[in-house]
């Protein structure tokens, strides 16, 4: 039913009598815009970034260059495992897992 309604509403081309008028108006508009541009000298934009914005940009650049692995920490854990001195705190790990799950709980809603 909706398709039948849409089929009855066809798009018709612009009448020939309107097209030249619109073209002339467009030409006049371009001429006025050109005159306005010639009378005004365009000054370059002056943009200044805050130190915070510069810090964020730098941090983003460093993060994009990093693969996200702390190689010193990995080496320290490997050494602890090899020497038998690695201590695992299961309560701390569980607390971190619960905190992470509550931080991401909005994804489940």
Image (tube, grey):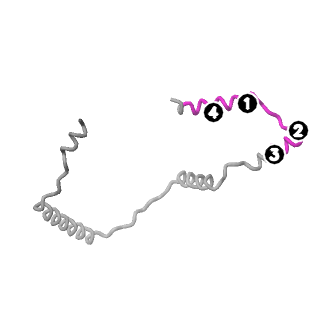
As measured in the structure, the alpha-carbon distance from the residue carrying label 1 to the one carrying label 4 is 12 Å
- Is residue 99 part of the magenta span, yes or no? yes
Q: Which residues are magenta?
A: 77-105
| Pointer 3 residue | 76
As measured in the structure, the alpha-carbon distance from the residue carrying label 1 to the one carrying label 2 is 20 Å
Question: Residue 33, how many percent across, how many down?
Answer: 24, 66
Q: Earlier in the sequence, mark 2 or mark 3?
A: 3
As measured in the structure, the alpha-carbon distance from the residue carrying label 4 to the one carrying label 2 is 29 Å
For marks 1 and 2, give the one nearer the viewer. 2
Q: Nearer the viewer, residue 29 or 16?
A: 16
Q: Earlier in the sequence, mark 3 or mark 4?
A: 3
As measured in the structure, the alpha-carbon distance from the residue carrying label 2 to the one carrying label 3 is 12 Å
| Pointer 1 residue | 92
| Pointer 2 residue | 84
Question: What is the quadrant of the N terminus in the image?
Answer: top left
For marks 2 and 3, give the one nearer the viewer. 2
The image quadrant that residue 41 belongs to is: bottom left
Q: Taking 78 as reference, is 103 left or right?
A: left
């Amino acid at each position: 039913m909706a398709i039948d309604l849409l089929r009855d509403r066809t798009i018709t081309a612009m009448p020939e009598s309107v097209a030249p008028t619109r073209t002339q108006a467009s030409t006049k508009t371009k001429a006025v815009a050109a005159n306005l541009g010639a009378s005004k000298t365009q000054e370059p934009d002056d943009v200044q970034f805050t130190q915070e914005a510069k810090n964020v940009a730098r941090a983003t650049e460093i993060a994009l260059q990093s693969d996200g692995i702390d190689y010193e920490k990995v080496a320290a854990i490997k050494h602890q495992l090899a020497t038998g001195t690695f201590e695992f705190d299961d309560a701390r790990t569980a607390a971190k897992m619960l905190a992470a799950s509550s931080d991401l709980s909005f994804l489940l809603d």
